[in-house]
Image: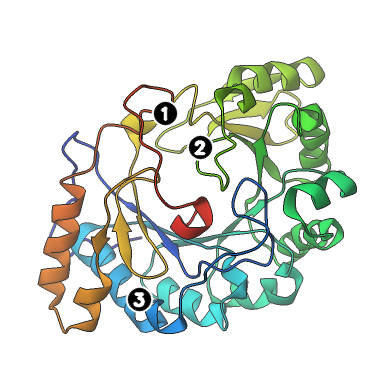
């Protein structure tokens, strides 16, 4: 895993060691999910403003070699719309760390084998409904069959584990909890239910739309006996099926924030460094990368930014401030 060549852990003001880097490779997407972006009118970043593969690799190398990062996840937008993505995966895999990808899966059949050959080890596929008409309404794209085939292609390519991310929304898809559990068990994939967070386009979020993790787990347990698994630093509470047929997870970002164990930071497609998904401040790494800053200067900038990492996001509290960016602009 990551080689911490000078023994310098990256520790934030609350004693959390930062080891996980999320990198958005594009703000573009081939879907228009209602909770993520508007149907029309998105202003995409000009190509020149997006980090090159060389710039991404250099930044990641500093995180790995200087601070011992041991995991990198590629996100978007939809990362598979970025041309030649396996080339970036191969570059990052050369750092000797775990490389993961989050995708909507619609074009995964075209890329899965090449991504695995390049060094991809894990994948998360976003899927919020197993019902065709509902999927169309949520994503504004009639692509359910291709996404389901994308799940199959990930399994065919040997990716393990394959995880399905389901954003659960009250009155929209909360009647599919058991359906998704059954799908995960039948396919041998891990379904992770995610509480709806205030990062959507259009300001439609209210806490009434949140389906609490406890309710999700109770609903699953009524259909299939489950037992808890030790969580660690992972965002998902994990439960295994008592009959040994896999497991399920719930990410309770709203009702049970896991900020106290957070080890993640993010780099946006245009090179802005964020210490939290809900951060209101960003740190410009692109300027350093493009103005011949030394590795030491970039490492210092990373350390300074992590020194501002807050205790938690405060969703549902009076002091919560919604980020100016949507999820597609930040990177999941």
According to the image, label 3 marks what residue?
57
Residue 278 lies in what quarter of the image?
A: top left
- Is label 2 in a helix, a strand or a loop? loop
Q: Earlier in the sequence, mark 3 or mark 1?
A: 3
Relative to 319, 239 lies left or right: right
Determine contact: label 2, label 1, CB under 8 Å: yes
Q: What secondary structure is found at the residue carrying circle 3?
A: helix
In the displayed structure image, the side of residue 193 where residue 229 appears, left or right? left
**Which of the 4 quarters of the picture holds residue 120?**
bottom right
The residue carrying pointer 1 sits among few (fewer than 14), some (14 to 19) or many (20 or more) residues within 10 Å by Cα, namely some
Q: What's the colour scheme?
A: rainbow
* Upstream in sequence: badge 2 or badge 3: 3
Q: Position of residue 153 (x, y in %)?
A: 76, 65
Give the mark nearer the N terminus: 2 vs 1: 2
Separation (CA) of disc 2 from disc 1? 8 Å
Q: Which mark is residue 198?
A: 2
Residue 22 location (% of width, % of height):
41, 57
Quadrant holding the N terminus:
bottom left
Tell me, yes or no, if residue 137 can be seen here.
yes
Query: How many numbered discs?
Result: 3
Looking at the rendered image, the disc whose residue lies closer to the viewer, 3 or 1, is 1
For the residue pair 254 and 73, the one nearer the viewer reads as 254
Q: Quick one: 62 or 307, which is closer to the camera?
A: 307
Contact between marks 2 and 3 (CB within 8 A): the answer is: no
Distance Cα–Cα, label 2 vs label 3: 31 Å
Question: What mark, if any, has residue 315 been given in the picture?
Answer: 1
């Amino acid at each position: 895993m990551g080689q911490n060549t000078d023994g310098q852990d990256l520790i934030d003001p609350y004693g959390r060691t930062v080891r996980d880097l999320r990198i958005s490779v594009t703000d573009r997407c081939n879907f228009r999910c209602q909770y993520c972006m508007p149907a029309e009118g998105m202003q995409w970043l000009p190509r020149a403003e997006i980090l090159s593969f060389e710039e991404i690799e250099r930044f990641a190398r500093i995180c790995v070699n200087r601070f011992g990062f041991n995991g990198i996840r590629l996100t978007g937008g939809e990362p598979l719309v970025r041309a030649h993505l396996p080339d970036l995966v191969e570059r990052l895999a050369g750092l000797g760390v775990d490389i993961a990808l989050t995708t909507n899966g619609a074009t995964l059949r075209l890329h899965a084998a090449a991504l695995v050959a390049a060094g991809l080890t894990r994948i998360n596929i976003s899927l919020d409904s197993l019902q065709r008409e509902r999927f169309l309404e949520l994503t504004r794209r009639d692509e359910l069959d291709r996404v389901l085939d994308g799940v199959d292609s990930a399994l065919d390519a040997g990716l393990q584990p394959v995880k399905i991310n389901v954003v659960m929304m009250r009155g929209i898809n909360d009647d599919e909890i058991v359906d998704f559990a059954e799908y995960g068990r039948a396919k041998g994939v891990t379904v992770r239910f995610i509480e709806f967070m205030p990062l959507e386009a259009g300001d439609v979020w209210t806490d009434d739309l949140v389906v609490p993790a406890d309710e999700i787990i109770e609903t699953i347990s009524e259909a299939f006996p489950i037992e808890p698994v030790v969580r660690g630093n992972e965002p998902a509470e994990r439960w295994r099926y008592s009959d040994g047929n896999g497991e399920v997870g719930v990410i309770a970002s709203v009702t049970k924030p896991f900020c106290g164990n957070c080890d993640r930071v993010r780099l946006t497609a245009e090179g802005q460094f964020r210490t939290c998904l809900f951060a209101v401040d960003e740190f410009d790494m692109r300027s350093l990368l493009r103005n011949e800053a030394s590795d030491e200067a970039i490492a210092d900038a990373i350390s300074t930014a992590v020194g501002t990492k807050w205790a938690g996001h405060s969703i549902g509290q009076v002091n919560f401030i919604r980020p100016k960016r949507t999820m597609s602009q930040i990177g999941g």
